[in-house]
Amino acid sequence: MKIKYNTISSNLLVEKEVTILIKRIDLNHNYISGNKLYKLKNNITEAKKKGYKKILTFGGAYSNHIVATAYLGKKEGFNTIGIIRGEKNLPLNASLQNAYDNEMNLKYINRRDYRLKDTDSFINKLKCEFGNFYLIPEGGTNFLGVKGASEILSNDNNYNYVCCPVGTGGTIAGIINSSNINQIILGFSALKNTIDVKRNIKLYTKKQNWKLFSRYSCGGYAKISKKLIKFINEFNINCGVPLDVIYTGKMMMGLFDLVERDFFKPKSKILVVHTGGLQGNKGMNQRLKLNLPEKY
């Protein structure tokens, strides 16, 4: 699979003598965009190997992982179940409608119960309700998902820094595992509270060449600001690369802020992993009457 790279041009980068290239893994599939294809493929293979007929997973209302699991699960012959954080709101947003159209059984639970999703008692209740299933954790973050994510960073050894958005921590853990000793991996969290994320990263990698930023989360998952919307739309116009409002937009806005603050030495070469997620923009546009980029 040939991956496209975009070189980003701006007066700021020229002034600071910093080079930024974007690795466009968001273009690797029409429906399973970006990192989700890497994180799901080994789990799907394992579910088939063990003879499962159902796959159950978790996610929020704008989850790229939910959309990808629904599509790939249907394609591979599985019944899929999505446990959705929050109340059901009609009409469904574009993300959940996409999952529903791909025959995913959507179950909505309150945020208090959602926090119990990793406990044995909660999983057993779900098995009583849905029967036996192959469990894929939220975001596809388990050892098989991280193993798949480690393939994202290939033939990219000549960059000083590698940047990626962070949700559950599986993608960055895989990238850290495949990084070389001289690279620093920078994660930009979509969540304000990173306690669980940091714990996940440390669970799946022993390397310490990484740093996680949370100050660009705009207050939390799926939360936005006028500054973020303005940045995404201007970046799309000036650089020709669409960003999503939940993950990649926050990452790129944070990265440019770091460049402006002289976080990087002159001559630094930075690789940015575009993990996809534009499907989430459609739902945000519907709900908030925005004009975020939705298509390439």
Image: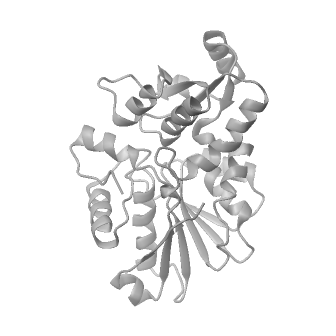
Residue at the image position 72 percent from the left and 31 percent from the top: 47
Foreground pick, 86 / 72: 72
Q: What sort of colour scheme is used for the picture?
A: one colour
Q: Is residue 75 above or below residue 245?
A: above
Image position of 244 (left or right of 134): left
Q: Position of residue 193 (x, y in %)?
A: 52, 47
Q: Position of residue 105 (x, y in %)?
A: 50, 20
Foreground pick, 188 / 48: 48
Q: Position of residue 89 (x, y in %)?
A: 33, 24
**Image quarter in which the C terminus is found:** bottom left
Image position of 56 (left or right of 275): right
Q: Is residue 8 above or below residue 30?
A: below
Residue at the image position 78 percent from the left and 58 percent from the top: 206
Q: Is residue 127 above or below residue 229?
A: above
**Image quarter in which the N terminus is found:** bottom right
Choose top left, top right, bottom left or bottom right for residue 284.
top left
Q: Is residue 262 visible?
A: yes
Image position of 219 (left or right of 58): left
Foreground pick, 271 / 200: 271
Q: Position of residue 207 (x, y in %)?
A: 75, 63
Residue at the limit of the structure toward the top, as seen here: 128
Residue at the image position 73 percent from the left and 61 percent from the top: 177
